[in-house]
Structures are given as structure tokens and as C-alpha cells.
Image: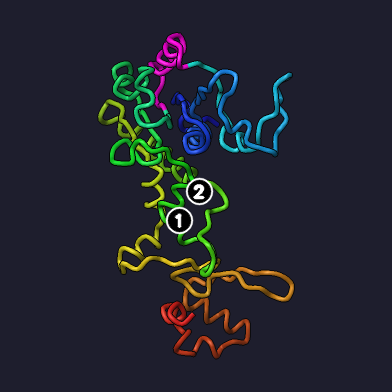
Amino acid sequence: MNGALENITVIDMSRVLAGPWASQMLADFGADVIKIERPDHGDETRYWGPPFIKNKTPNQPPQSAYYHCTNRNKKSIAIDINKPDGQKIIKDLIVKSDVLIENFKVGGLIKYGLDYESIKKLNPNLIYCSITGFGQNGPSANRAGYDAMIQGEGGLMSITGESEGEPMKVGVALVDVMAGLYSCNAILAALMARNKIKKGQHIDISLLDVQAATLANQGMNYLSTKNNPKRHGNSHPNIVPYQTFKTKDGRIILAIGNDSQFKRFCQLTDSNYLSIDKKYESNENRVINR
């Protein structure tokens, strides 16, 4: 079965996680993804381990599990963009491509003639996706941005962890992964738009924007009340009960999404008195009186 993007060619000049995650999704959908890496070193995540996975290519070093998690279904080519010959090879590839993904610092590709303004002259139909910490414009545009930094600045750490404990980062680089998802969605939308407007676009993905957008209910809780969200550990800010509980033989997760479920739970656990107690009969009251 052919993928939905089987006739789409993607040049992936990004490194680490957010950009490679986006191009990996495009590859999963059938796109031909060409990953451009630095000679003699490649993407630094190749070395982020242990654990490492044995290389199937003879006489080649093992690669980290981290690298494998975000680079499947791609071709890889080593090109030195510092050299004119390398720049020419990339430009020749771009002329024949549909999408380019990069996560260089803002303006970092200008000296190579590989920035959007230069490239759109070679291929006006190219979808050019730039991923940075803080976007292409604004007072923080030139700052480097890493997932842990953005989890802190973007508010995610402030709502993660136990209520009396320290702010905690999420167990995976969630901002990078979400930025990859947003990038993939934007690229797909731009490809659809290209059919109508007959030209490409420059997509500006900011890790901080992505983090703010994915605060979801916690973000809207703040906007509607002006109260800073608190950490609730494994419980939920808007639903009760929706959390972990310690039992005699281990921990359980109890997730009750509405009052009917709560009433049924009380029946099953011989706790009917809770479902008729004014303090607990509705989710609103359970949240207030938790």
C-alpha cells in the first residue's frame, strides 16, 4: 500500500528531536525523506546513550536508541555545508523537493545561501519549515531554546509534580515532540494550500509557542480566572476523582469523568453515602472539597 505522501520529497536539515520527529512522521506517511548530516559526526543524538543498538552496516559504530526513536524510514547523506560544493548539492536537492525542515538559529543559514529568502528564488513552491526556541522575530529570537528550558519558561514544570514539591519536567522531551507534531500538521496544511495558491510558504514554529498552546485546560483555567495553576501531582485540576491511589497490593489509577460514573463507582464499592453527600455528589463540589 502506497503512503499518502509517496510523491513528496522532504529535505531534513534538522537535528536532535523536534525537526526529526516531524520528518519521521512525514516519512511514515510515505514521503521520501533525505536527512542531511555533518560529515564524520552526524546528528549528535547518534551518541546519546547508552543504550546503543548494533549497526547493521559492517564496520560502523552502534547508534543510540534515542537516534533510532526519531529517524526511521529516512535516507541519510553527509554533506559539509561550509563548503561551496556542499551548498550546491543541497540546493540541487532543494530544487527537486517539496519540503525543507531546519532548526538552525535564526539567520544561521544566510551565510550558506540556504535561508528561506534565498531558497524561494530557486524553488518558489518549497514548503520551508523553521523550528526554533522562540520564533523568527521578537526580543528572544536569537536565544537558543532547549526542551527543558521551554518546559520551565512555558509553564509546564510549574504544573508538574507534587503540590508541596519542586517543579518537575516531564519524563520525555514533550515540548520537542509536540513541536514536531505541530510542524508536521503545518507542513501538511501548507502542502494542501499549495494546490490552491500555487506557491510554497515559510512556516515559523516556536517551541515556546507550542508549549503555551499545549497548556490546554490549564492555560484556559488561568485566562479565565487570572489564578496561577497549581501542581496537583497525579490528580487532576478539574476532575475528582482522577488520580492514583495506594492500595494494599499496589497502586491503582481511578479516573472518573462524570457524575454518573461516580455514582456507579460508589455503588460498586459500597460507598453510596458519598454519592448523596452534597459535598461530593457533583464534580464541581468534589473539586472544591477534595
Residue 194 vertical position relative to residue 181 in the rendered view, above or below: above
- Can you identify the residue that label 2 sits on? 174
Type of amino acid under label 1: Leu
Q: How is the image coloured?
A: rainbow
Q: Residue at x 40, y 37 (%)?
A: 132
Residue 264, position as x, y percentages in the image = 55, 80
Cα gap from disc 1 to disc 2, whole angstroms? 10 Å
Which quarter of the rendered picture does the N terminus lie within?
top right
Q: Is residue 93 left or right of residue 115?
A: right
Q: Going from the N terminus, do you reach mark 1 or mark 2 first?
A: 1
Between 192 and 123, the one nearer to me in the picture: 123
Q: Residues within 10 Å of mark 1 (few under 14, many from 20)?
A: many
Q: Secondary structure at mark 1?
A: loop
Between 55 and 146, the one nearer to me in the picture: 146
Q: Residue at x 33, y 20 (%)?
A: 119
Q: Is residue 281 left or right of residue 213?
A: right
Type of amino acid under label 2: Leu
The residue segment tinted magenta is 81-100
Q: Residues within 10 Å of mark 2 (few under 14, many from 20)?
A: some
- Can you identify the residue that label 1 sits on? 156
Q: Residue at x 44, y 89 (%)?
A: 278
